[in-house]
Amino acid sequence: MAPGRKGDKGRSRSRSTGARGSTGGPTHTVVPTVKKARKEILSKELGYNDESNPFGDRTLTDKFVWKKRNEYLQAAGLYKGSTKNQEVERIQSKVREIHQVKKRRDEREVERQLLEAQRLEQDRERHEELFDDWVATEQKFHLDNAKARSLLRIEQGRERPIDMVVKSLAIAEGQDFEDMSILDSPPYDLFKNVDINEAEEMLNDIEINLKADKNHKAFWKAMQFACNEEIESKQRAQSGGKAFGSGVADGVVSEIHDLLSAKSRDELEEMLIEIKGSLQGGGAGLDTQFFDAVAAKIPLYMARAEIADWHGKAKLLAEAAIRKQERERVGGYGSEASLSEEEEAGQEEGAAAEEEEDFSPVLEPVDDDQNFSPVLEPLSKYVGEDLLDPDDDARLMKQVRQTLLDAFGAGSSSSKGAGGDLDRSKEDEWVAKQRAAGMDSDEFAFNAAGKGAADDFHGELSLPKQSYEWEDKYKPRKPRFFNRVKTGYAWNKYNQTHFDHDNPPPKRVQGYKFNIFYPDLIDKTKAPTYYVEKDPASSETVILRFHAGPPYEDIAFKIVNCEWNLSQNFGFRVVFDRGVLQLYFNFKRHRYRR
């Protein structure tokens, strides 16, 4: 019985163990129930299971058991098992923590998106500000270039009609020039004396200035309107049409022209509103065709009034500046008396009128009884041989003067140099020959003295006075020269993106051609030399100095600081032949290569 009871007892213990496992005890039978609960919670709350989860974990729903830790705790008597409810509560706590982490992650993502949107908005605003500044800078750059091209053409004597208009606008804005002369009549009269092709070319120049000059947009729009009207008028005249249309008789055209020309812009606007009101209201006996033709012409006269206003401002300032230059030229003495009544009236109307000062000396009173005539002495006091007839004296003086002129070669003022008695006719002939040879389309004369300061200075440089060892034998003099500067467009990636051939980028200097004339060089075996010196005022330019022997002084030019291309295949030339030093060079063109 005992052994059998022992076996029965063993069997009953194993069954009881299974029973306890079903009630959630701390043995292995708890795991299937808790594992099922874990699977349900993970699948319901997170949508994860062993087969489908973002981690690729096949044992995701299995509980992790730290066996070594449990063994140590059990050996120390500190191990405490957990119930089913505790396990389920722990799982639910972990799930809630996962949800909170996801929520915080979503909140951080929303905050990141908001911050990114704010950053993009700030960047856009900053870029818009920078773009506006860049647009303003670019517009100013194009305007300055347009003005510089116009003034350069005026200075070189190849000005276009629009160049004088640009100069008038600059004078109206207060800018001073050496030559303050402007057009005598308002600029819209330029369109009357040209043909249609020339008027269209002027229209192109006006459109360029309209795009570049934002400060005088109304003026250039008025010029554009006046030019278009004149072109249409010439086309109608060629086809046999009338200037004012079919509704206006030829006999009253001049009267309408005088009436509209005499009114200001504001008066023309009021007249246009009144005519349109009358046409809309209608009325018995109203010649609608006549008033339609007149109303169509009023905008033209409004544009002419705008142009005339600017021309009037420029004319007043130009006349005042010319009078000031005349006073400075004569030193201020007696200049006020030389002004005509019309000039004085214009000076009173101008805003730049100056206070008149009296520089005349105070006259002493003269006694009418005194006689200031020279005393006439009798002829008997003089010997007859010492007396000269006035006609004979004038003839002798003329002969002596002509003899001196022939002896010293002063018959032509153009053949005199700085010394006054040097024959430089050969040099003048050479310079005239160089000018007659002409220049290429992309070349310009480079002979004027430099103007401006720092980076803007470009041209001949005035050197300080030098002393030479040979001054006691030869009188120093400057050599004659005729130089050219080569310009062109740089079609780099930026210019290809932002410009085209209809709207080209600004031209840049691409090279120079120097021709220096040394016909009277004493030692012709030593060729003149040139030196490139650093410009202390700017790193953008350098000083090119030419040096020769007696009797010639050094001359220098300030040129653009770029690397020279010393290959003869690209135009480099330095030759001294027959008294002429030729230095031709182009700048290197650096191209981007991957």
Image (spheres, helix red, strand yellow):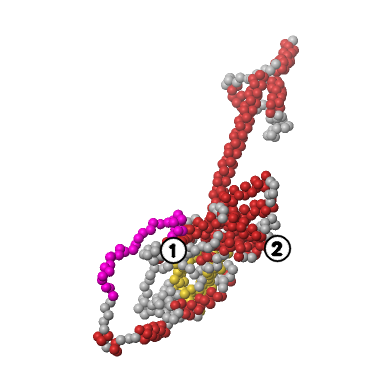
Q: Where is residue 44 in the image (x, y as percent from the top left)?
A: 71, 26
- Name the residue furthest bottom: 385
Identify the residue under disc 2.
240
Q: Label 1 sits on what residue type?
A: Ser
Q: Assess disc 1: are there few (<14), some (14-19) or many (≥20) residues with their C-alpha within 10 Å of its C-alpha.
A: few
Mark pair 1, 2: CA separation: 47 Å
Does residue 420 show up magenta in the picture? no
Disc assigned to residue 340: 1
Q: Relative to 479, say whether 451 is above or below.
A: above
Q: Label 2 sits on what residue type?
A: Gly
Q: Residue at x 59, y 55 (%)?
A: 259
Q: Position of residue 188 (x, y in %)?
A: 58, 60
Q: Relative to 323, say whether 526 is above or below.
A: below
229 or 498, which is in the foreground?
229
Q: What element carries label 1?
A: loop
Residue 68 in the figure: left or right of residue 373: right
Q: Residue at x 27, y 85 (%)?
A: 379
Q: In which quarter of the image is the N terminus?
A: top right
- Name the residue furthest top: 1
Q: Relative to 482, say whether 80 is above or below.
A: above
Residue 75 in the figure: left or right of residue 472: right
15 or 144, which is in the foreground?
144
First along the sequence among labels 1 and 2: 2
- Which range is magenta? 344-373
What secondary structure characterizes most of the magenta part? loop
